[in-house]
Amino acid sequence: MDYYGFWQMLLDEISAAPKDDERRIVTFYDARHYARALSEWRTLRTKKTRLRQVQVAPLIRAFFVPAAGAAKLMHKFADTLSVEEDYRIQLHALPSEKTGTAVMPWGVKAIHAPQAWSKSTGVQVKIGVIDTGADYRHPDLRHSLATGVNLLRRGMLPLDDNGHGTHIAGTLAAAGGTRGMMGVAPRATLYPVKAFDHNGSAYVSDIVLGIDWCVQNRIDIINMSFGMKTRSKALHNVVIKAYRAGIAIIASSGNDGKRGGDYPARYPETIAVGAIDKKRRVASFSNRGSYIDVYGPGESVPSCWLKEGYKEMSGTSMATSHVTGSAALLLALRPGLTPRELKLLLRRTASPVRLRKGQRRASLGGGAADALRLLRAGIRAKRGPSANAASRRAD
């Protein structure tokens, strides 16, 4: 392969790109070809400054390139690499609702998290929150936040300029005590991964880099409250890498109120989450279907907000943070649990949701998350069959 020619062709595409928001993901099939292309790029970028706009993703052997097209590249190197559009991806929250106050959120109570705290509070579990960042000044979050990473401005703290990430962080691990808000896993450690801008928009490449960072930093669970309609080979590849590294990825299904849902929740390696309302029915806005593994509280959920405030929001985004928090409670007790085992336990311990008129239970997928039942089942599974039988007799 002509690696110099490869980069020259990409350089021409970069120079011809009419818009800054048109990008491509170039993925190599073979690790050796990728290594040679990476080495050539490192040499050339010192002289050809436009190549400095290229980002690398070693975990999936990819380059992220600001280019409008790559037809010539695909034609010449079809046996060596693939090219796909770097799609935009959106958060899964509905427009902001009324401002809330510091209370024990109804969703935290609905999944029986407070009753589970005598067994686990999520201590030492590392949660990667790929989102808009977090408000590091919020009093309910200051003991829960680690440094994380800002993928939009490297070297800076992942500060939230949107609010969505702070809201997710609050449901996950707020620890405000009696004067503030309490999240599902108040002693878990959150690692904000800022991939979304102030408008709540990101590229697939930003998400790939975020998951890559989580793998490199040995995160235990990744919360992904966002999605898109289009399949992405690059995104699926990095999800598989995280799955094989033992990291559970918990993803929201979307807010279209339809059967089916968004990616990455549709990938089999993720734990797909839908939303229930305060009556324990599948929320009218929530996507649903047999692929949904579990539902979480997602209607008018109060949580932390910017400027040390609170706000109520709805969406499968909010539901996902409840499920991720529940998973953190279990992983604190069962740190060796695999993503597959976690998914099976979440599905097995979920409570039946209430049906709306005309709904069939089989068409909805999983049930409603229950943190207490999850912990009990996880503890019993760790003890083994004989201990489980004795425990059932005692119950």
Image (cartoon, helix red, strand yellow):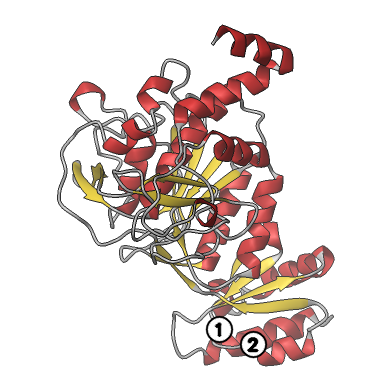
Q: Residue at x 61, y 9 (%)?
A: 393
Work out how far the residue at label 1 is from the one at label 2, CA to CA, in angstroms: 7 Å
Q: Are marks 1 and 2 in contact (CB under 8 Å)?
A: yes
Q: Amino acid at mark 1?
A: Ala
Q: Is residue 230 visible?
A: yes
Quarter assignment of residue 236: bottom right
Query: Looking at the image, is 237 positioned above or below residue 8?
Result: above
Is 84 situated left or right of 117 in this image? right
Q: Residue at x 38, y 62 (%)?
A: 255
Closer-to-camera residue (242/273): 273
The label on residue 378 is none
Spot the residue most to the front: 358
The label on residue 70 is 2
* SS assignment at label 2: loop
Counting from the top left corner in percent of width and height, residue 299 is at: 29, 49
* Mark 1 burial class by Cα count in 10 Å: few <14, some 14-19, many 20+: many
Q: Quadrant of the N terminus?
A: bottom right
- The number of callouts visible is 2
Q: Residue at x 37, y 54 (%)?
A: 356
Q: Quadrant of the C terminus?
A: top right
Q: Amino acid at mark 2?
A: Ala
Q: Which residue is mark 1?
A: 67
Closer-to-camera residue (363/100): 363
Query: Looking at the image, is 297 positioned above or below residue 90?
Result: above
